[in-house]
Amino acid sequence: MPRDQYEFSDPTTRYPNTSPEPQQQPEPGLESRMDPKPDHGEDSYRGTGRLTGRRALITGADSGIGAAVAIAYAREGADIALAYLPDEEEDAQRIVALIEAEGRKAVTIPGDLTARNYPAALVERAVAELGGLDAIVACAGKQHWQAEITDISDDQLVDTFTVNVLSLFRLVQAALPHLEPGSTIITTASMEAYQPAPDRLDYAASKAAINNFSKGLAQQLIGRGIRVNVVAPGPTWSVLQVSAGVDPETLPGFGSSESPMGRPGQPAELAPAYVFLASHESSFVAGETLNVNGGMVTP
C-alpha cells in the first residue's frame, strides 16, 4: 500500500491482487465482514485543501467507492452528508468517525433509494444540516448477477433501475434549486456500460443509462454554471462483489483477468477522480466520462 496517493510506484503492484476466497453475504452486505477488506484510503489519502468549505451529498457513502470519496472529501476540507441503507449503519459509523477525525461535519441520512420520496427528503435534510449543497456525488448502486436473462425477476429489474437510474433523476431534481454556479454533480457509471458482462445485463444497461443521462444533463446545466461529469470504474473490490454482485465462484480471479494491470482496483484508487471533478482544477471539464479501470479499452 502506498504512503499516500502521490507516492511514485509501479501501478501494477501498487495494491495487491486480492484473490479472495469465495464468500457471500445477504444484500446489502457489510465491508466489516469481508476478507480481505477493501482499502478506502483510510491510512493513505492525504488532503491538500482542494475542497475547503464545500458541502457534499454522497450516496453509498458507507462503503466501497462512496466511502473512499467521503474520506477524501473530508480530508480535502468538505463537510459530508452520507446516504446509505439502514442495514449498513455499522459501516457508515466507521466512515463518520474518519470524517469527524478531520474536523469536518458528517450528517447521516439512512434510507432506501427505491422509495420514491427518499431522494427529496435526503436533499432537504442535507441542505438543512450542512447549510446548503454544492456537490452531489452519486455512488450508490445495485448489482445482482444472474446466469440467464430469464433468471432476472421483475422485482430485481425494477429495483436495479430504480436505485441506479430513477433515484438519480429524482436526486438531481430535488437538489437543483439549491445548487449555485460552481456546483458539481458527479455520477458513477461503469466499465459495464461499454463491455457488459453477460451475467449482469440489468446492471450494465443501467450503467449505460447513467452515462447517457449525465452527458445530456451536462449540456443542460452548463449554462447555469453547474458541471456534470461521470466516473466509470473498472472492477473494484467492494462489498458489492460479495453480496450477490458477481458469481461467488469467480471471486478468486476477480479483476485479474479483465484488467490489463492483472488486479482489481481498490476504492482508494477511485477517490482522486471524484476529488478532481469536484474541484475547480476541472473547471473546463463537463460532460466527461473519466474511466478509472486499470487500462481496459473504452470506445
Image (cartoon, rainbow, N blue to C red):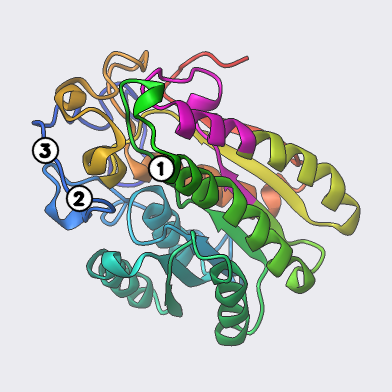
Q: Which mark is residue 23?
A: 3
Residue kind at label 1, given as amino acid type: Gln
- Sequence-first disc among 1 and 2: 2
In the rendered image, residue 269 lying in the magenta stretch gets the answer no
Q: Residue furthest left?
A: 21
Q: Is residue 248 left or right of residue 223?
A: left
Residue that mark 1 sits on:
156
Numbered disc 1: secondary structure = helix
Label 3 and label 1: CA atoms lie apart by: 21 Å
Q: Residues within 10 Å of mark 1 (few under 14, many from 20)?
A: some
- Image quarter for residue 251? top left
Residue that mark 2 sits on:
26
The stretch in magenta equals: 186-209
Label 1 and label 2: CA atoms lie apart by: 15 Å
In the rendered image, residue 208 lying in the magenta stretch gets the answer yes
Numbered disc 3: secondary structure = loop
Q: Residues within 10 Å of mark 3 (few under 14, many from 20)?
A: some
User: Does residue 34 show up?
Assistant: yes
